[in-house]
Amino acid sequence: MSKQANFRANIIGGGEAGVAVTVEMDKDVIHQTNSLFWDTKGNEVLGATALPLYGAFVSEENHRLLGDVSGKKILEIGCGSGQSLQYLGERQAAELWGTDISENQIGKTRQLLESHGLSAELICAPMEDKCGLPEDYFDIVYSVYAIGWTTDLEGTFARIASYLKKDGVFLFSWSHPIHKCVAAEKDMLVFKKSYFDESWYSVELGGNTLSLSDRKMSTYVNALAKAGFVIEQMVEESDDDLLQAQGDSSDFAKKANVLPVTFVMKARKL
C-alpha cells in the first residue's frame, strides 16, 4: 500500500490516535491489513462495541430500534466477539447468523455462543463479497460499529438488501462523521480534518496498522437509497442517562454533550 505525503491527525474512539497517513485504496491490501488487525490487537486496542450499546452513549434499551426480535431470522455484519448475537439469542431470535473478516473473531463468537447454549451460522468473509448467504431470507440485518470498515459502501448495502426479505429491516451504527473531524484540546473543540475528506488513511494503533475512510453522512444516505432502502429513523443524540453515568471526567463525555459521536440508522427494504 503506497503512502502519499499527506499526514493529518486522526480521531478514533474518544480522542486522537496517532498520525493518519493517506493511502491509495487497494481493496485486497486493506482487507489483509484490517483482518490482521482484528486477528491480533483489535479487541485490545479498540475494545468490543456490542448490543445493547450501538456505540458511545447510544443504547438499544433506550431507543428500541430492533424491538421484539423473538422468532426473527437475524444476520450480523461484522459479528466481532459475538456479544451482540448473544444478546439477541437470549431474546429468542429464531436464527442467528454472522459474518466477520477475522477468523479469530469468528472463533471467539462461536466459543462465546456455545458457552451460553446458543448457536449461529458463522462465515468468515469480507462484507463486500458474495459468501453464500441466503437471499430474501432475513427479517433483520444489523451491524454495530462495523459497516465503516467496508471498502465498497454501495456494494455492501446492495448485498445486504439482497439478504433481506421485502420490508426487512437494516440497522447499523458507526462513528458520527463530525466526531471524526473534531478533537478536544484545552477545553476547546478543534477541527482536525475536513468533513468532506473521504480519502483512505492508515494509522498505527497498539503496534498494528488499520485502514479506514471517514465518509460523509450524505454518502451513507445516498448509498442506502441506491440500494433500495427507505430510512425510517436516525439517532445521533447521546443518551442522557449514559452521559450522566460517565460524568464530566473525560474530554470524550464533554465532547458528546455538544456534538454527536455515534449515529444509528434504521432503514427498511422496499
Image (cartoon, rainbow, N blue to C red):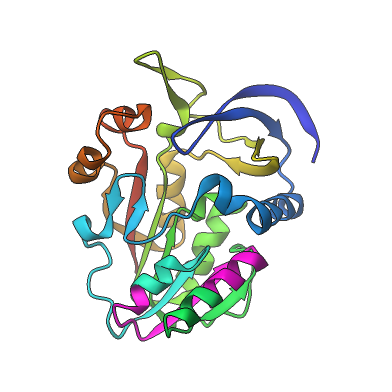
The residue located at (39%, 13%) in the rendering is 186
Where does the image place residue 116, in percent across and percent down from the top left? Answer: 42, 80
Between 260 and 107, the one lying in front of the other is 107
Task: Decide if residue 242 is on the left or right side of residue 193.
Answer: left
The residue located at (65%, 36%) in the rendering is 201
The residue located at (36%, 43%) in the rendering is 262
The C terminus appears in which quarter of the rendering?
A: bottom left
- Is 94 covered by the magenta stretch? yes
Between 3 and 15, the one lying in front of the other is 15
Residue 131 falls in image quadrant = bottom right
The N terminus appears in which quarter of the rendering?
A: top right
Q: In the picture shown, does residue 150 fall above or below 78? A: above
Task: Decide if residue 153 is on the left or right side of residue 90.
Answer: right
Q: In the picture shown, does residue 254 fall above or below 1? A: above
Task: Decide if residue 248 is on the left or right side of residue 51.
Answer: left
- Is 23 covered by the magenta stretch? no
Residue 21 falls in image quadrant = top right
Residue farthest to the right, as pictured = 2
Magenta residues span: 88-110
Where does the image place residue 43, in percent across and percent down from the top left? Answer: 56, 53
Where does the image place residue 165, in percent across and percent down from the top left? Answer: 39, 79
Q: In the picture shown, does residue 245 fall above or below 170? A: above
Task: Decide if residue 18 is on the left or right side of residue 231.
Answer: right
Q: How many discs appear?
A: 0
Where does the image place residue 35, in percent across and percent down from the top left? Answer: 68, 57
The residue located at (22%, 62%) in the rendering is 64
